[in-house]
């Protein structure tokens, strides 16, 4: 079993910054792609950013230049540095990870339970 747990969310004024963290724990042989998604009220969940094991990144157009995704492969942890936040960034943020639990086992995608980010004055 694998667990992901997001932390670092909260209330921040427009223009502020937050750093989200998400360590994966449990039965992990190796982690591959990791990412952050968000879900705004009454909207579908959308990709914010993703990062491959080798460090290749992908960002939603709406966050390019403001958000930075990074990871620590030794700790199976993914981070999201969010700068210049605006009210449209208010959402529940979820992390996910593609993980293999044994050398010959299948790849599975796991999700955290989410952390609320609220941008408001």
Image (cartoon, rainbow, N blue to C red):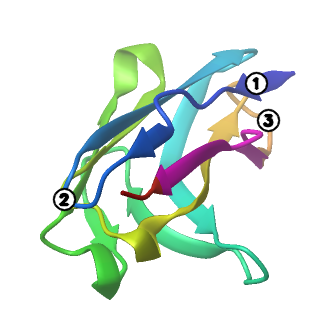
Mark 3 closeness class: few <14, some 14–19, many ≥20 residues within 10 Å: few
Q: Quadrant of the C terminus?
A: bottom left
Which of the two labelled residues, at mark 1 and mark 2, occupies the earlier sequence position? 1
Are the residues at dot 3 and dot 1 in contact (C-beta closer than 8 Å)? no
User: Which element carries disc 2, helix, strand or loop?
Assistant: loop
The answer to if 110 sits in the magenta stretch is: yes
- Image coords of residue 98 (percent x, y): 63, 47
Query: For mark 2, what is the residue?
Result: 15
User: Which element carries disc 1, helix, strand or loop?
Assistant: strand
Q: Which of the two discs, 1 and 2, sits closer to the camera?
A: 2
Seen as rendered, the residue at the extreme left is: 65
Are the residues at dot 2 and dot 3 in contact (C-beta closer than 8 Å)? no
Q: Is residue 102 above or below residue 16?
A: above
| Residue drawn at point x = 31 percent, y = 40 percent | 18
Pick whichever, 35 or 16, lies toward us.
16
Read off the magenta span: 108-118
Residue 22 appears in the figure: yes
Q: Is residue 93 left or right of residue 102?
A: left
The answer to if 78 sits in the magenta stretch is: no
Q: Which of the two discs, 3 and 1, sits closer to the camera?
A: 1
Q: Quadrant of the N terminus?
A: top right
């Amino acid at each position: 079993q694998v667990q992901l747990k997001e932390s670092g969310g909260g209330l921040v004024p427009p223009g502020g910054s937050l750093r989200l963290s998400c360590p994966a724990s449990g039965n992990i042989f190796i982690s591959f792609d990791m990412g952050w998604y968000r879900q705004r009220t009454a909207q579908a969940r959308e990709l914010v950013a993703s990062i491959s094991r080798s460090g290749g990144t992908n960002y939603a157009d709406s966050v390019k230049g403001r958000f930075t995704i990074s990871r620590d492969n030794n700790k199976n942890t993914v981070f999201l540095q969010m700068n210049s936040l605006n009210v449209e960034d208010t959402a529940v943020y979820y992390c996910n990870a593609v993980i293999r639990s044994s050398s010959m086992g299948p790849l599975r995608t796991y999700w955290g339970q989410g952390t609320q980010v609220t941008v408001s004055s």
